[in-house]
Image: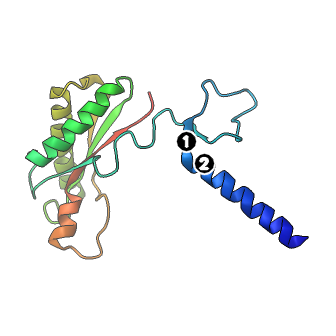
Amino acid sequence: MRIGRLIMFSMVALVVGDAGAAEVKECPAPLPKNGIDFSLPCFISRVPPDLIPAGDEKVYFESGSWVLSAGARAVLDQQAEILRRYPTHPVETIGFADNLEAPDSIEKEKLGQKRAAEVRAYLIESGVSAARIAALGRPWPSFIPRQETEESLAAMRHAVTRISEP
């Protein structure tokens, strides 16, 4: 009897797991008065989780620079194309600096702000409304590397574009 229940539970878990992975839909708007219907997989956020694909949300900079490279402009062109499709969603560009180019938090924030402002300006030139884009610099690193190698420092020098709900 216990083995039968275990097998039945495993089959239900597999069916539910497959259904959830197959298609995730946005929850109905407005939400029902008695809450979310958990019988159907959905997400509450009105922003699809993969609006900007992973890896395409960041652009990288040379040490001490806020000038956009050709590769960064190509990534921003893709971002702008997506952002133009969602004209009511607010956007933040957040700039970061590495520990060597900006040793203290004030310098990190200033350099990050310059990088974010450059990204913002490029997105505006690409047809995204200026009113919906904020540019921010952060006084802390986006991550703390185990070792400060050229590779880890280069990964810290970036600006990220984030989209939120309208």
Q: Is residue 66 visible?
A: no
Q: Is residue 131 above or below residue 80?
A: above
- Residue 100: quarter of image: bottom left
Q: Quadrant of the C terminus?
A: top left
Image position, residue 29 (x, y; %) = 60, 25
Which residue is denoted by mark 2 in the rendering?
Answer: 20
C-alpha separation, residue under disc 1 versus residue under disc 2: 6 Å
Q: Quadrant of the N terminus?
A: bottom right
Near-viewer residue (40 or 139): 40
Near-viewer residue (137 or 161): 161
Give the amino acid at mark 2.
Gly
Residue most toward the right?
1
Which residue is denoted by mark 1 in the rendering?
Answer: 24
Whether label 1 touches label 2, CB < 8 Å: yes
Which numbered marker is on residue 133? Answer: none
Residue occupying the point 41% across, 35% down: 164
Image position, residue 63 (x, y; %) = 10, 58
Q: Is residue 75 above or below residue 3?
A: above
